[in-house]
Image (cartoon, rainbow, N blue to C red):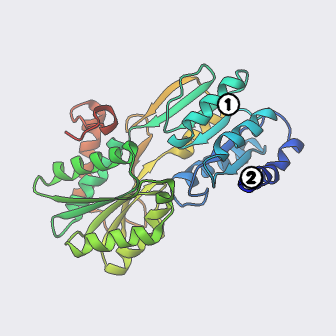
């Protein structure tokens, strides 16, 4: 029974062995389940770290979580070697960050998608519901059947927040639209299960859905492939994923985790930072890969709604604030 903890410790020791040779006070980033190359959430964080590295001409530390126990151990190892700031990616890192940040009050920390109320922690959250509203509008306007879909990753309030915003936007554009929704699972493996994502997408397509928004990390890759194979449309999330399947990707709900990590590496500001449409924290993606799919009328209406949300003329329900979507 003692083998697994020993192996875990050995793995961490190996993965973080370079820390002792690295100059103190370098920033660090800890990715969550799904890996830094998930083409979505974690990869956006990686892109931000790489941008900082290129501009600063300095190195940073990183670790990819493959086991929940590694969250605290990785932060503690980095903190012991003086890394600062230490940035945790994902809501699941909240409890471990609180423990480690308390033990190292002179170091700075930042966390994405969670709130840790400590004087040396910056909590960076996003108004995902606002960006999801816009892509929901686009889905409803692009749909030929009047049926759109949503595939979430792990069934948590944060992903319900995406779903709720998406449904509101779809119904704003077409009050008669039908929205089908599925979550991939209830454990962290739901973030990296493309096969299951494809299954859920195919089931929705069979019901007449012709546009699906996936907020599921690496699982979304399966949704996008299924959409391409079926000749349907898909919407990416977090990173701009339009390039994955040009002609299939209607748009992407961009969540600027890259900017959050980049700014945190430059210097943290303790407290809560909330990033929405007004702050440029979320948006929809338009580029050469999806330009032919987004009509001028569609863009005009979505941009008008975006301006109205920023101005406070349209209020998008935040599921996490009300714990319901109404």
Q: Nearer the viewer, residue 196 or 35?
A: 196
Q: Residue at x 79, y 48 (%)?
A: 16
Q: Which circle marks residue 257 in the picture?
A: none
Residue 181 coordinates in the image, percent (x, y): 27, 58
Mark whose residue sits in front, 1 or 2? 2
* Residue ID at (66%, 43%): 29
Relative depth, front residue between 265 and 42? 42
Q: Position of residue 137 (x, y in %)?
A: 24, 53
Q: Badge 2: few (under 14), some or many (20 or more) residues near its Cα, within 10 Å?
A: few
| Circle count | 2
Q: Is residue 48 above or below residue 201?
A: above
Image quadrant holding the N terminus, namely bottom right
Please indicate, yes or no, whether residue 75 appears anywhere in the rendered image. Answer: yes
Looking at the image, residue 2 sits to the left or right of residue 318; the answer is right
Residue position marked by numbered label 2 in the rendering: 2
Residue drawn at x 42%, y 67% is 289
Task: Return the x and y of residue 98 as percentages of the image width and height.
Answer: 60, 29
Residue at the spot x=14%, y=58% of the render?
Answer: 177
* Residue underneath mark 1: 100
Q: Is residue 46 above or below residue 259?
A: below
Q: Quadrant of the C terminus?
A: top left
Q: Earlier in the sequence, mark 1 or mark 2?
A: 2
Is residue 301 visible in the rendered structure shown here?
no
Residue 294 vertical placement versus 132 (above, below): below
Compared across the picture, whether 176 is left or right of 88 comes to left
């Amino acid at each position: 029974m003692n083998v697994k903890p020993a192996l875990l410790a050995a793995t961490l020791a190996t993965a973080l062995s370079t820390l002792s040779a690295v100059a103190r006070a370098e920033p660090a980033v800890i990715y969550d389940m799904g890996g830094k190359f998930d083409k979505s959430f974690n990869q956006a964080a990686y892109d931000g770290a790489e941008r900082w590295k290129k501009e600063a001409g300095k190195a940073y530390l990183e670790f990819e979580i493959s086991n929940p126990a590694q969250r605290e151990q990785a932060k503690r190892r980095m903190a012991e070697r003086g890394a600062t700031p230490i940035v945790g990616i994902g809501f699941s890192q909240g409890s471990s960050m609180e423990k480690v940040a308390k033990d190292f009050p002179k170091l700075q920390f930042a966390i994405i998608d969670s709130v840790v109320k400590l004087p040396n922690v910056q909590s960076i959250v996003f108004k995902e519901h606002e960006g999801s509203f816009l892509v929901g509008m686009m889905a409803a306007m692009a749909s030929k059947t009047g049926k759109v879909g949503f595939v979430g990753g792990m069934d948590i309030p944060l992903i319900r927040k995406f779903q709720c915003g998406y449904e509101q936007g779809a119904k704003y554009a077409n009050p008669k639209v039908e929205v089908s929704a599925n979550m991939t699972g209830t454990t962290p493996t739901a973030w990296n299960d493309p096969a299951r994502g494809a299954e859920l997408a195919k089931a929705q397509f069979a019901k007449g859905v012709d546009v699906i928004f996936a907020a599921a990390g690496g699982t979304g890759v399966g949704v996008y492939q299924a959409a391409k194979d079926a000749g349907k449309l898909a919407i990416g999330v977090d990173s701009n994923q339009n390039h994955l399947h040009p002609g299939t990707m209607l748009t992407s709900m961009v969540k600027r985790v890259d900017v959050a990590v980049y700014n945190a590496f430059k210097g943290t500001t303790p407290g809560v930072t909330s990033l929405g449409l007004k702050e440029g924290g979320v948006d929809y993606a338009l580029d050469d890969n999806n330009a032919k799919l987004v009509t001028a009328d569609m863009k005009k209406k979505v941009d008008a709604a975006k301006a109205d949300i920023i101005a406070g003329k349209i209020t998008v329900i935040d599921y996490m604030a009300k714990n319901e979507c109404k």
